[in-house]
Image: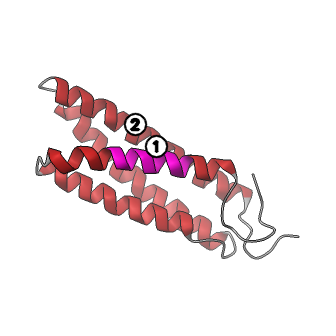
Amino acid sequence: MPTHATTKPGNLMLLRAATTVQTVVVFVQAITAGLLLSARGHGAPHSAGAYTLFGVTVLHLIVAIVTWRRGGGGSPRPALYAAGFLVLTLAQVALGIAHVKIVHIPLGVLMFGLSVLQLVWIWSGRRATGAGAVRA
């Protein structure tokens, strides 16, 4: 029996799509970072990727909030994760602009790991959405 904490399938697919796109963009950032560190003149793709990641992260936060609120009051966990990831993204951009590689690189690795964990969590169906919630 569905409860007020049920996540609607359409909203869940939007959340999955946003998380997937975010993870792909973070992965591409890792590739462009490798190019940037291995040879000079590859800063433009990494910089463009940073702007893209910021935009995707903001959209992910919006989708997570809409999913949470329209989902009938389910778990706010995806929205809290997306907000935390946005904070990490802003810190990463600031560290990159300041050329603080000693923190920028490990934070990028951490962000990739967190994004993959969120991707597995959102696609696995083990979400804390309450009893009787839709499992996809």
Quarter the N terminus occupies: bottom right
Residue 95, image x and y in percent? Answer: 18, 53
Is disc 1 surrounded by few (<14), some (14 to 19) or many (20+) residues within 10 Å?
many
Query: Pointer 2 and pointer 1: residues touching (CB < 8 Å)?
Result: yes
**What number of labels is visible?**
2
Mark 2 highlights which residue? Answer: 27
Name which residue lies at 78% across and 60% down.
134
Amino acid at dot 2: Phe
Q: Amino acid under label 1?
A: Thr
Q: In this view, does 1 lie above or below 126?
A: below
Question: What secondary structure is the magenta-colored segment mainly?
Answer: helix
Residue at horizontal 19%, vertical 30%?
36
Judging by the rendered image, the residue that carries numbered circle 1 is 23
Assess whether residue 114 is covered by the magenta stretch. yes
Residue 75: % across, % down: 62, 71
Q: Is residue 66 shown above or below 22?
A: below
The alpha-carbon separation of the residues under discs 2 and 1 comes to: 6 Å
Would residue 4 be found to the left or right of residue 67 on screen?
right
Q: Residue at x 57, y 71 (%)?
A: 76
Image coordinates for residue 22, horizontal then vertical, percent: 45, 46
Q: Is residue 92 left or right of residue 130?
A: left
Which segment is the magenta one?
109-119
98 over 79 or under it: above or below: above
Regarding mark 2 in the picture, which secondary structure is present there? Answer: helix
In this orientation, does residue 130 appear? yes
Coloring basis for residues: secondary structure
Q: Residue 95 carries which label?
A: none
Q: Residues within 10 Å of mark 2 (few under 14, many from 20)?
A: some
Judging depth in this view, the residue of 92 and 65 nearest the camera is: 92
Seen from the viewer's position, the closer of residues 69 and 131 is 131
